[in-house]
Amino acid sequence: MAVIIDFHTHIFSPRIKDNRDKYITADPCFAALYSSETAKLITADELIESMDREGIDISVILNIGWSTNELCIETNDYIMESVSKFPKRLIGFGVIQPIAGDSALKEIERCVKGRLRGLGEMRSDIQSFDMTNKDLLDGLVEILINNNLVFMTHASEPVGHQYQGKGSITPDILYPFITNYPDLEIVCAHWGGGLPFYALMPEVKKAMKNVYFDTAASPFLYSPLIYTQVIDLVGPDKILFGTDYPLLKPTRLMGEIDSLNLPDETRKTILEDNARNLLGI
């Protein structure tokens, strides 16, 4: 049986789920993503139930770009608890607020001790930090590299339709960050806002040696041809299967992948191998 790893899911504690309005008021990122009652919130237990239904073996559970260090700590706690409860099914990423300074550094160290595998999904546009500010980020990135942690950032397209939570982390914002930290393993969510297309520029392709792209929310953004196009541009070993569940069910994305008749080896690379290699599992 083929193993499927979903690299992009979001969970929240029962406390947040039961107090949505409170957190909408408290935080701009949560408000941007979950102000609508149709934006579903799920707990770790509910994610596991859905994984069993949908045939997902392992999920990466991501946090969101909270604006305060206190909210980062509170929600990272739940990510850690969830990983401890389901160690064979869930892999956790925490978040920090970089402008919190030393408190942010301490929180990264706590995430390391809590056996989280990365930071994400970071939102520099809403968290109000500059991804080109080396004075702010050098110390944080050093800890990530030294502990083999992955940095996942939201990414969005500079053109096209607007949607809830689209934001403004476009390829021109991502690229200087990537070139500043060539040894950092970076995942750009949502196909990197189109960044893979610039791999046709030799210097960009060279700079992206440690950059990966997930497929989260792909049916809302692109036609299924995005898979074959990005495979041609950066190779299948740079693509991570991710759904953005509960925004989209895995079957929706799997249907698109199945329609392309990709070679079995390529499918396995995208659905399992790349995630295993990146996370060391």
Image (tube, rainbow, N blue to C red):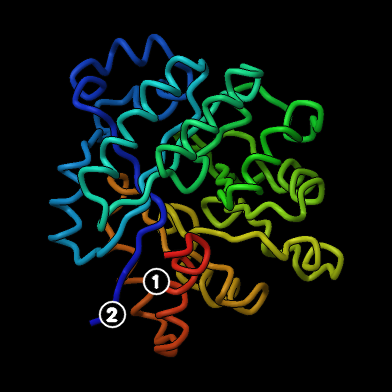
Distance between the Cα atoms at labels 1 and 2?
Answer: 9 Å
Label 2: which residue? Answer: 2
**Foreground residue, 70 or 213?**
70
What is the count of numbered marks?
2
Label 1: which residue? Answer: 271
In the current view of this chain or complex, which residue is farthest to the right? 203
1 or 2: tag closer to the N-terminus? 2
Query: Residue 164 at what x, y percent from top left?
Result: 44, 33
**141 up-or-down from 251: above or below:** above
Mark 1 Cα-neighbour bin, 10 Å: few <14, some 14–19, many ≥20: many
Who's the residue at 79% across and 30% down the image? 133
Q: Tag 2: residue type?
A: Ala
Query: Residue 266 at what x, y percent from top left?
Result: 47, 83
**Foreground residue, 205 or 96?**
96
Mark 1 vs 2: CB contact within 8 A: yes
Q: Which mark is residue 207?
A: none
Query: Residue 146 at what x, y percent from top left?
Result: 65, 47
Tag 2's secondary structure? Answer: loop
Q: Quadrant of residue 101?
A: top right
Q: Tag 1: residue type?
A: Leu
Q: Can you say which quadrant of the picture contains the C terminus?
A: bottom left
